[in-house]
Amino acid sequence: MAATTLRGAAIVGLRCGGRGVCAVLAAAAAIFGAGCGAAMRHLPALATAEAPRADGFDDHGWALTLLENVSQGCVNYDHLRAHPEPLIEFLARIERVGPRTRPEAFPTRASVLAYYVNAYNACALRAVLDAGAPESMYELGRASPELRFSFVVDERRVTLADLRRAAREAAGADARIEFCLCEPAIGAAPLPSTPLRPDGLDAQLDAIARAALARDGVLRFDHARERILVALFLHHRREALTDGYRRRMNTPHGTLVNALNLLADEAVRARLTSAVGYEIVPMPFDRRLNACASEPAASPALDRN
């Protein structure tokens, strides 16, 4: 599909906030204008050399990006491409400030965790814009988006996979982090419309998990075949989620259903209760872009009430 991108001639279509940022994006166009290929795409730094180094950390640009472009887990990429300035500002900031270079600005586990989650999700949006917001993640190439792009974060070059590992390390045994790391696909965790922040982190993690589990694309019931279908990102981490339940409840016993029941809202708990004994299976991964659109039509065999 033809689409505006962060490279090539389409750079001129972006409304850049400041001459320095426009120059950096123009340089990106020159570097990356000749086709995608299958190799790693090393996206250039956005922070300009003359920009003053921030003493602290401010996520205002990321908060504004989410507020203006994210609704119910989906992203308005058309609007984001037309108004990228807040995202560019935040990306430029995390290039130069982070737990490694400014540990005094991230004194707690919660502050480090919030940093890496927000960095992961912001870089994922940048990867989509660079690729021209394709209809499917298949169009980004055969490699996973987590390994397809690299970014400058905290003054070193990393991939999305590196940022995911850093977030998991900061989270320790808390598997609720899996609901927060949002690949740009319908089958992934839905993107929250507010940043993750250190203050009240525990309540935020609960709220994000609760909202995700209420979505058909994350948890689905097939009563005809006595199955509970869970999103692939949960199925991959089912042991970590189950272990988290055991620790939280101080019990040696537990299942993935127990873990989901603990995190879900009352309505979803009732649905889980109605499916006691069902087989748990992973959903096929839906690689379509998490763009603002209706969710796939319901199958008659699946209960969504």
Image (cartoon, rainbow, N blue to C red):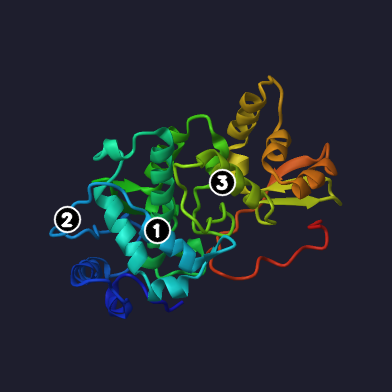
- Could you classify mark 1 by the number of other residues whose Cα lies within 10 Å: few (under 14), some (14-19), or many (20 or more)? many
**Label 2: how many Cα within 10 Å (few below 14, some 14–19, many 20+):** few
Q: Decide which of tag 1 and tag 2 comes sooner along the chain.
A: 2
Q: Residue at x 44, y 53 (%)?
A: 121
What residue is at 58 percent from the left and 40 percent from the top? 236
Residue under numbered circle 1? 62
**What residue would you read off at disc 2?**
52
The image position of residue 268, as x and y in percent, is 75, 48
Residue 13: assigned label: none
Per the image, label 1 sits on a secondary structure element best described as helix
Q: Of the residues under marks 1 and 3, which one precedes in the sequence?
A: 1
Q: Amino acid at mark 1?
A: Trp
Q: CA distance from mark 1 to mark 3?
A: 18 Å
Query: Which residue was labeled with disc 3?
Result: 179
Q: Quadrant of the C terminus?
A: bottom right
Q: Residue at x 33, y 68 (%)?
A: 85
